[in-house]
Image: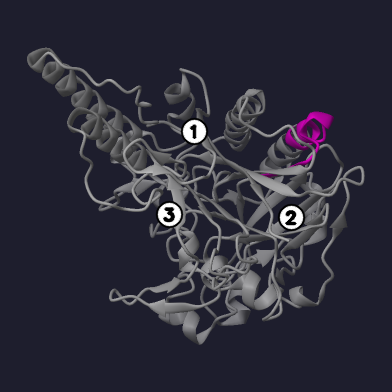
Amino acid sequence: IDAAEPTDFFDNFFEEPVIWVEGQKYTSVQYLGFNLFTAPGTEADGCLNVGENIDACYLGSPEVLNDTQHRLSIFTQAIDRAYASEYWDRNPETLKIFLAPEFYWRGQKGAYRIGPSLNLASEIAVKSLSGKLRHQRFKHWIVVPGTVVMVQHADQSYVEMSHRPYENISYYNFAPIHIGGTDLMYLKFKNFISSIDFLQITPGVSRQVQAPPGRAHEFCKKHPDSNGCIYHRLPRHLLDQMGWQDFQILRGGILNIGGVRVGFEICLDHAMGQLCNNDLKPDETVDVQTIVSAGMNVASGPVCTKPGGPTFLADGFSRTELSLNRFGQGRRSTMTEAKRRRYNVGLTYGADAMVSMQQWVADTIYDLTGTGFGTREAGMGTLPGGSESAGSTGIVFKQIAALGEEWEELFAGYYATASYKEAQRAENLLESSLKRFEKKEEGAVETEIPEPKVLPTVDFYGPLKLPK
């Protein structure tokens, strides 16, 4: 087996890269979040005959090249539609950050197996996407197209010699980071394996990748550095074989671009405080913190921005979030009644289909009756920009459909769609009921209330002025 480096080894001893794009200093930042499901599918998404007592599966094509090309096509369509939108800030002093969720590139077996087929597929996809994002039109953008998940099987004699379980597979999970309009590209490797990162499927069932125990498992408490507990960093020669030769390893989790310190985390690393407690000194801060995840939220981990500094999250359960750490206490935490640790990050603004539907229902009732429910702060139970009934948050927030009218056809078999369909069905029932009410009562909703977005979106937060 190729020697793989632990991802946290001496990371905090490396100097952060300093980047200037044509000497531009940034004073503001804008977040563009690709909002979709990258979590495994269920029976409702077509997971049939996977195995006994299994109610979920990985989606994708069994052919690695077909799989990566289809995911590449979806991503490029989404970022092209975002670029064509009027909602992103054309001011060169505004740094645009586009994030897709963790596990965007995963494959039908739970991870891509390292080998000749993956080498070819990866090389083609990397060349295509990096070539696109090098274009001058993406100047003053940072693009993180989700994470890539791979596994490498060990030689059986090595496994027998180690006398330790879970040494037969090395797991890799990393986020490519593209500095748009330049040749600068980085790879940020995830450190901690979560128990929800892989489906607990018996090896041999549909040739699925063996699930590691994950950080919270009793085994990992005794063997924290085992292959089943931490992801590793791919050796340079394997990265080169797969087309990643122009990417630098981001060892410390921070880039300094245009005078703005941007921190990067992947899912469980955020809850474990990788950026705030390992990459930074206790009194250090970043200007912007970013998280790509699948099963995480901002308040579940420490935030180390300055007071008013943004944290952006793109989660694979179809949600984006923003926190501004208004109190400057994002490193402080307490335990909830449910024994979960929560951090004092201030109000978290979030967008998902359920929030969008809740806001639509609340605004419709408010328009019909003149009285809304509750006196909550705008942003609590509303989309990040606020709502008709709750008022404005003061944050500029817009959404567009990430893909065209054929999005379901594009997503089918690759990303979960069943929850969107059920949400659309509920929306249709509510709309039909409202029309019947309006006809019966001879009244109508007078305010133009935006319909809920119950499909994959690109969410635009800001621009936001960076604190000094």
Is residue 315 within the magenta segment? Answer: no
Q: Mark 3 is on which residue type?
A: Gly
Image-based side of 252 in relation to 417, left or right: right
Circle nearer the viewer, 1 or 3: 1
Find residue 7 and report its image quarter: bottom right
Mark 3 lies on a secondary structure that is: loop
Q: Are marks 1 and 2 in contact (CB under 8 Å)?
A: no
Q: Is disc 3 surrounded by few (<14), some (14 to 19) or many (20+) residues within 10 Å?
A: few
Name the residue beneath numbered marker 1: 457
Q: Are marks 2 and 3 in contact (CB under 8 Å)?
A: no
Q: Is disc 1 surrounded by few (<14), some (14 to 19) or many (20+) residues within 10 Å?
A: many
Image-based side of 412 in relation to 459, left or right: left
Circle nearer the viewer, 1 or 2: 1
Name the residue beneath numbered marker 3: 204
- Display colour scheme: one colour
Q: CA distance from mark 1 to mark 2?
A: 25 Å
Q: Residue furthest front?
A: 370
Which residue is found at the position 46% from the left and 33% from the top?
456
Closer to us: 268 or 301? 301
Q: Residue furthest right?
A: 23
Mark yes or no: residue 61 visible.
no
Is residue 137 within the magenta segment? Answer: yes
Name the residue beneath numbered marker 2: 187
Residue range corresponding to the magenta coloring: 129-144
Which residue is found at the position 70% from the left and 66% from the top?
1
Find residue 277 and report its image quarter: bottom right
Q: Earlier in the sequence, mark 1 or mark 3?
A: 3
Vertical placement of residue 372 versus 297, above or below: above
Q: Is disc 2 surrounded by few (<14), some (14 to 19) or many (20+) residues within 10 Å?
A: many
